[in-house]
Image (cartoon, helix red, strand yellow):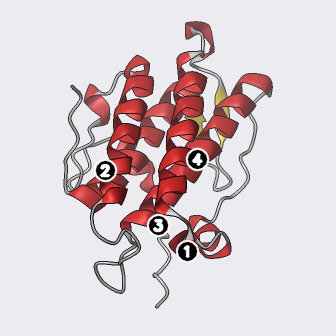
Amino acid sequence: MAITPDTKNWTWVLDRPCPDCGCDPAIVDYRDIPRLVMENASAWPTALAGGDARLRPDDDTWSPLEYAAHVRDVFTKFTERVEQMLSQDVPEFDNWDQDATAIAERYRDQDPGDVATELTAAATRVADAFAEVPDDALGRRGLRSDGSEFTVETLGIYFIHDPVHHLYDVTGDRFSKN
């Protein structure tokens, strides 16, 4: 059965803690993002190794494998966005339909071991992309296709919620800054 597409505007995560996963923008420092990414990535192989990673808990929820494939692709998408913000003046990001991508890329049919390996590699790239941003470039701007404006700094804080939240979706583990 198809998952109902998520159409929420998640930019609110920049203003208040997520009541589900506990990710709190007030306590996330931009310079912590690379470490948080790598800690998140290190949890996915275990999450994919337990039980049948392709099994959906219900008809409306992605499987651990689908969440991991999505997180891998989020890491790749945000690497691209950081690079755009550093190389272009106020780029407008292409719309990315995560649900269409999940279907087109057949997340459900991918190999969990391959996804874990690819997720870790993509995590390293995005962690490096955020780490390499000089302080004087943190204010560079970019626009989402719906008009939401980000700086590199706010993009990073917005971004980190996604993998944190999806790991929570799979494991139930809430956010911890440490």
Locate residue 136: give its quadrant.
top right
The circle drawn on residue 66 is 3
Image quadrant in which you'd find residue 39: top left
Around disc 3, counting alpha carbons within 10 Å, would you say few (fewer than 14), some (14 to 19), or many (20 or more)? many
Q: Is mark 3 on a helix, strand or loop?
A: helix
Q: Earlier in the sequence, mark 2 or mark 4?
A: 2
Cα separation, mark 1 vs mark 2, equals 19 Å
**Is the residue 136 above or below the residue 65 in the image?**
above
Q: Mark 1 points at which residue?
A: 109
Taking the image as shown, residue 55 lies to the left or right of residue 91, namely left
Q: Mark 2 and mark 1 in contact (Cβ < 8 Å)?
A: no
Contact (Cβ within 8 Å) of mark 4 with mark 1: no
- Quadrant (top left, top right, bottom left, bottom right) of the C terminus: top left
Spatial CA distance of label 4 from label 1 is 33 Å
In the shown orientation, is residue 100 left or right of residue 63?
Answer: right
Outermost residue to the bottom: 1
User: Disc 4 marks which residue?
Assistant: 148
Residue sticking out furthest to the right: 88
Which element is circle 1 on? helix
What is the C-alpha distance between the residues marked 2 and 4? 35 Å
- Of 142 and 127, nearer the camera is 127
Which element type, helix, strand or loop, lies under badge 4? loop
Dot 2 corresponds to which residue? Answer: 46
Q: What residue type is labelled 3?
A: Glu
